[in-house]
Amino acid sequence: MWRTPQAGTDAMAPVLQCPDCGQKHPLENVADTPAFRCRGCGRMLKVPTELLPTAEEPPPPAHFPPRRVPEMRAPASSLPILPRLVRIGIWFVAMPLAFIIVFGFARTFHVFTQRQMENTFLQSGWGRFWPIMRLLPFWALGTTLLVHFSNIGIARWRIARKQGGGRGSGKPSSSQRTRSRSRSRRPPARVAS
Ligand SMILES: [Zn+2]
């Protein structure tokens, strides 16, 4: 059905010659198909299996889970580490700020009353420290959270400032804390029946 190429053409690409009409077909052009139609006479010609391209690895099954490409969003851990002085400064600001926030909340929700605060200074005995002691974990937590998010925020701000080309630096003024200490509570209106 097919003939090997003549001697002396070993180095050339294999050629398949039609046994009917003698038309030669270079297998480079038909190597992908196991059979093809002769250009001369139209007879179906089979490509010998040893001349077929080596079977490649079968494609993975369709249900193979596609590999998830990691997202290119920069995580917080990849942000540059702030200078030592800035980090210390953040702690110095965050600790009193967290103290104000925590004790402000405690005062607002009557967890820590005015009398308890006075007792801390005026009374004796270890029991007077308990109202403050139980708030210390919240103070520590608030400080840690403030420091954490300040580090991230300042690091991002520095990156943005570097990329933005030194536009107006929006420095947050620390004097914005307006504390309305004396919030008079109005007694609920009583409906006369
Ligand atoms: Zn032919």
Image: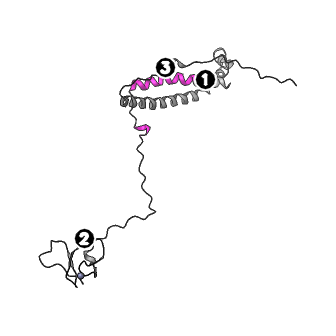
* First in sequence: mark 2 vs mark 1: 2
Q: Amino acid at mark 2?
A: Asn
Q: Amino acid at mark 3?
A: Ser
Q: Which residue is mark 3?
A: 173
Q: What is the x, y in percent for residue 163?
A: 36, 31
User: Is the residue marked by circle 3 packed among few (<14), some (14-19), or many (20+) residues within 10 Å?
Assistant: few
User: Would you say 78 lies left or right of 191 here?
Assistant: left
Image quarter where the N terminus lies is bottom left
Q: Give the label, 1 or 3, closer to the camera.
A: 3
Q: Which residue is mark 2?
A: 29
Give residue 120's quadrant in the image.
Answer: top right
Q: What is the x, y in percent for residue 181?
A: 63, 17
* Tag 2 and tag 1, C-beta contact below 8 Å: no
Q: Residue furthest right?
A: 193
* First in sequence: mark 1 vs mark 3: 1
- The residue under the point 55% across, 25% down is 98
Residue 95 part of the magenta-drawn span = yes
User: Would you say 189 lies left or right of 179 here?
Assistant: right
